[in-house]
Amino acid sequence: MSAIDFRELMRLEKRRMRMQKSNSPPSKSKDLNGVNNDTVESTHSVDTIEKFSDNLLGNDGKTRPLHKDILDDQLSKVLENSQVGAEVLRDVFYIEKLLCPNFERKLTQWLKSLPTINNNERNVTSTGGIVKYHGKWKRLDFARRSVAMFDFRVVKEIPPLLQVLIDMLLRIKAFPGTHPPNHVLVNEYQDQEGIMAHTDGPMYLDRTATFSIAGGDVLFNFTKRKPDDGVDDDSNNDVMQLKLHGNGSLVVFTDDAYTNHCHSINDRIHNSVEYASCKCVNAVEGEQIQRGHRLSLTFRHKFEEAI
């Protein structure tokens, strides 16, 4: 989809939201810290996202500072106005198309250019091992996917494209300023690859932010965590399902959704197609989801003692 098409979609969405707002009374919402706030006009988020995503890159393809006319208080409302499935599972926020096509394309190209680590090399969890594997692709044969890790507790220099995303996550208050994202895990999924139900655990602040790029859509499942081992192995017991669009979407989940629920993506999908269940909060039941090549960038704050 071209940038012009994207702006046209935003205009249509703003018009729809204005009509919807005129027919509904004001409501109350909570921010990520649980504080009640009057709901900001819905179009506010759309305007802000449009300005933000269209200005991540200059005409020369290089990253540049965000426009100063986008006020922090505007950006801070973008995420809290994007809560989904609150009647089923609180603390999940989703924006379908946050990154503009130019930025997504630049990010994808850069990730593909990262060097690759030989699979025969031994994993090392010490500080020296983190430096060795930092910013390099490694194939996880047992998990059937490739990953690249960035740990900015050890390697202080942050690549410009990741710095843009970190700044944005802070400005929309996905992370508190006291605990900014300092760890990025990039997963490369082919159309039939997924990940088993798991939690990210206590080594991290209780929130995760994941961007999906490179085109492939996928169904993201939340299941109730078992109290004994923290893993729910019953993939048919979804609490909530979310369609993640593969062209610049962002999902953030915190608190209860992070601590007491597992998340997963189904693997070994027949013919690269899956279907939304009745638990899906942003797609109708039975909607066909076309899987494809997908890159996910998961941002977290990892505690210093968790080397």
Image: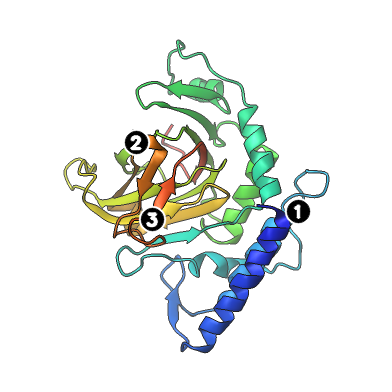
* Residue sticking out furthest to the top: 120
Q: In 3D space, how far apart are the residues under numbered discs 3 and 1 (Cα atoms)?
A: 39 Å
The residue at which mark 2 appears reads as 270
> Which residue is painted at 76% across and 61% down in the image?
67
Residue at 46% of width from left, 70% of height from top? 31
Percent across and percent down for residue 99 are 62, 52
Amino acid, disc 3: Glu
On the image, the x and y values in percent for residue 53 come to 67, 57
Q: Which numbered disc, 2 or 1, marks the residue that appears first in the sequence?
A: 1
Pointer 1 residue: 65
Residue 268 - label = none
**Comes first in the chain, label 3 or label 2:** 2
Secondary structure at badge 1 equals loop
Is residue 41 at least partly visible in the picture?
Answer: no
In terms of sequence position, does the residue under pointer 3 or pointer 1 come before the other?
Answer: 1
Residue at the extreme right of the image, as rendered: 60
Residue position marked by numbered label 3 in the rendering? 287
Q: Is residue 17 visible?
A: yes
Amino acid type of the residue that numbered disc 1 sits on in the rendered structure: Pro
Q: Amino acid at mark 2?
A: His
Q: Residue at x 50, y 79 (%)?
A: 39
Residue 172: image location, x then y, percent: 57, 61
| Horizontal side, residue 60 vs residue 208: left or right | right
Please rate how many residues cluster around mark 3, counting C-alpha atoms within 10 Å: few if below 14, some from 14 to 19, many from 20.
few
Q: Quadrant of residue 126?
A: top left
Q: Dot 2: what SS?
A: helix
Classify 10 Å Cα crowding around label 2: few (below 14), some (14-19), many (20 and above).
few
Q: Hey, which quadrant is residue 141 in on the image?
A: top left
How far is mark 3 from mark 2, CA to CA? 15 Å
